[in-house]
Amino acid sequence: MTESDTPGLLARIRHSLAPYEAEEPLAASFRAQQLQAMLRLTPLSMLVNLFNASFILYRMADQAQWLWGWLLVLVFFAFQGLAAWYRVQRRGMRSTASRKAMQRALQHALILGALWGALPALLLSEVSLQDQHMLLIICCGMICAGGFALVTVPAAANAYVLAMAAGSMIGLLHTDLPGAEILVCLLLVYSVVVVASVQVMAKSYGSRLVAEADAAHKQQIVGLLLRDFEENSSDFLWELAPSGQLGHASGRLNRALQFDPQRDAALGLAALIGRTYEAAAVAPDHAIGYLEKLQKALSTPMPFRDLLVPVVIHGTLRWWALTAKPVEAPGQDAPGWRGVGADVTDRKHAEDEMHRLAHFDALTGLANRRHFQHRLQQLCGHDGSPPGSAALLCIDMDNFKRVNDAYGHANGDLLLKAVAQRMTSTIRGRDLVARLGGDEFAILLDGVTQVDEARCFADRLMQAIEQPCDLSGISFTPHTSMGIAFLPRDGQRPDTILHHADLALYEAKTRGRRQAQFFSLAMDQKAQRRIALEDGLRHALAQNAMHLVYQPQISLRSHHITGVEALLRWSSPHFGHVSPAEFIPIAEEAGLIRDIGLWVLETACNAAQQLPAGLLMAVNLSACQFDDALLVDKILEVVARSGVPAQRLELEITESVFLRDTEDVLTALHRLRAAGMRIALDDFGTGYSSLAYLRSFPFNKLKIDRAFVMAIHQSPESEAIVRSVIDLASALHMETTAEGIETADEAALLTQLACTTGQGYHFARPMALDAVQALLQDAP
Ligand code: C2E
Ligand code: MG
Ligand code: MG
């Protein structure tokens, strides 16, 4: 063993003997507790000391006079111990104790141990055998009792025990007692056992001190945190007694609920919260429902989390989230509750806003498509709820694009808002009105299954909507078209019923708008045929499977053929002959008409090259072709490529082109006219027949629709219309062509009315190019 090892070893021994490990100042407080525990037993210990000493003196003073002196010294130290105890009693124990205080305790124990050890060491060999026994028994008892009385200060206990044991052993070795050596050994073992027991008990006492200090420390931290929580956060703690009464609660909660323990003893938490609504001018929506939920949660002994309740504090609505768990109360049937609450108003507002954005249209405030779909799914029983019945109205504003284009998007928005508001004011509480996008709306009339009822509502709705709106000073009256389908009769799935209402809307649009149509199976079949036709048209265009026929136009004065109108024909192996009246609108909608139109123009130009130079070639242009900004360039290019003089071409347009951007259309028409082409207004009288169109553009020709020609003999009104159209045209220096002349009488009357040319089965049907050539050859 080296020198440097020695302090290390000692430290290790001291460390293993120490009852605990602690740093100052914790160690100082432990020392105070050790001393206090020891002092608690001091009066009893000193009494035992004095009693035993008096007994020994009584028995053995005659054999050893010095015992009186010994007694005096013992009494002195016993009183010192008692004085220390008394001091603590009087002024209370300090919370800390120095190492010196421990040392003093150790010294005191050592002195007592030495005093008692001196007794057997000096006396044992002097007294009678009987007294020897008595003395040894007392010493053993004192070793044990002293060891345990001092156990909380193990160093003192050990010093006392070892000093006494040493004295007793010395005394034994000086006697002539038979087997004294064996007794010494036994005493040694006995002392070691006492020391070891002291050590074990001291360790366990030490761990208790550490545990208690640890718990106190934790409690202090928890206390601090709680105080900080209550003072600085918006959260609060609450406690309910099994009787339901509010117990410990944060000041914040008490203030919010204006809780007075005396006055409100009988009120439960839900009642206290409910009381805040009374003072509020407006009770929060569904407040009672929230309170019922809270009451229900408190009536079942199950923890709950983030239960939302509205509270009115200082006249403003706040939202609390309550979390709590039941606390069993001995002897009570119902549990008490302990929980926390948080003011989650901001979060609730943010969530509400998110919900609003997700379910409602930002412009009109109506339900959005998602919300609508959800409700429709509910009605179809797709979310597990029993399926219901309803009438579904798909509503589209007529010509909304024109409002946007003419008055600007801000006014378009104003109009949408006004229409939305009118819709909302027409429906009942259980119905739903939604904006599906753009100018598309939908209404679900809950429980409506009868056509009459739905029609009645549609009429009322249309009336409500068709009121003038003020769009930044301009008065505008909106119109709508509606399609109606019934759930479950017309479809049991959300997409089917919506599709069917859409088909009915489409029908309403094609039948001239501003009306409501009910879905019928025929519409579905028609729609399916449309899709199939659209597909067929694409193939026909790609495979050049369409052709043109030409219908002659005859001068009613000279009876010569003055021109032909090119008419498109499509015969498909699948659909047979399909009328252009059916497939042209489909091509228009599918966006195929641009390519078809150019193909027709090119084919007609090539055909014109094979006809006499004086003949006009009339070609129909669809209104949709005017959406193409490059239309005029394309036409000019085709005509130039074919080599036909532009003057031989007559382009037929219908009034519907003026539903588009009139400025653009007029510019295009002027460019075409400037290039030498003639422009005819087809089907005059069937469309909007606004004289404004006639004024705005110098048409070369008006084509009087077949509908008037057909009725010319039957109705005087038709004759009057035809007559005035011809007069008007001639006043504006325009020619006229009567379409669909089927009889000689019609031809005669129209000749008499001074119509320029005629076209119809009476003269010739539309025919192939070679047939036109043959006809021309036969003509006089
Ligand atoms: P539209 O331009 O008014 O053409 C006249 C229509 O009346 C033609 O029908 C013609 O066959 C028919 N018609 C002529 N005379 C008589 C008659 O005496 N009695 C009866 N009942 N009908 C007569 P079609 O060829 O079926 O064309 C229908 C419509 O389809 C055309 O009306 C036109 O708007 C459109 N269309 C035809 N070809 C084309 C084309 O190449 N391009 C465009 N954009 N539209 C076309
Ligand atoms: Mg035509
Ligand atoms: Mg026509």
Image: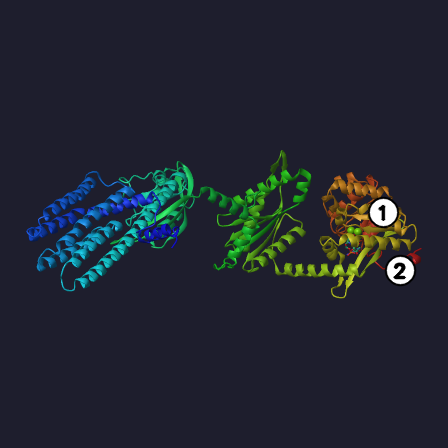
Seen as rendered, the residue at the extreme left is 62
Up/down of 9 relative to 732, above or below: below
Q: Residues within 10 Å of mark 2 (few under 14, many from 20)?
A: some
Q: Tell me: is circle 2 under 8 Å from ligand 1.
A: no
Ligand 1, seen in the image, is in the quarter at bottom right
Front position among marks 2 and 1: 1
Q: Earlier in the sequence, mark 2 or mark 1?
A: 1
The residue lying toward the viewer, choosing from 538 and 180, is 180
The reply to whether dot 2 and dot 1 touch (C-beta < 8 Å) is no
Q: Residue at x 78, y 62 (%)?
A: 571
User: Element type at marker 2?
Assistant: helix
The residue lying toward the viewer, choosing from 649 and 533, is 533
Horizontally, is 304 left or right of 742 in the view? left
User: Amino acid under label 2?
Assistant: Asp
Seen as rendered, the residue at the extreme bottom is 573
Up/down of 27 relative to 474, above or below: below
Q: Residues within 10 Å of mark 1 (few under 14, many from 20)?
A: some
Q: Residue at x 66, y 51 (%)?
A: 509
The residue lying toward the viewer, choosing from 247 and 692, is 247
Q: Which mark is residue 636?
A: 1
User: Amino acid under label 1?
Assistant: Leu
Number of numbered discs overlaid on the protein picture: 2
Query: Residue 670, located in which quarter of the rendered image?
Result: top right
Horizontally, is 464 left or right of 286 in the view? right
Q: Do we see residue 680 in this rendering?
A: no
Provide residue 556's location: percent of width, then percent of height: 86, 49
Q: Quadrant of the C terminus?
A: bottom right
Provide residue 738's location: percent of width, then percent of height: 81, 49
Q: Tell me: is circle 1 under 8 Å from ligand 1.
A: no
Q: Which residue is mark 2?
A: 770
User: Element type at marker 1?
Assistant: helix
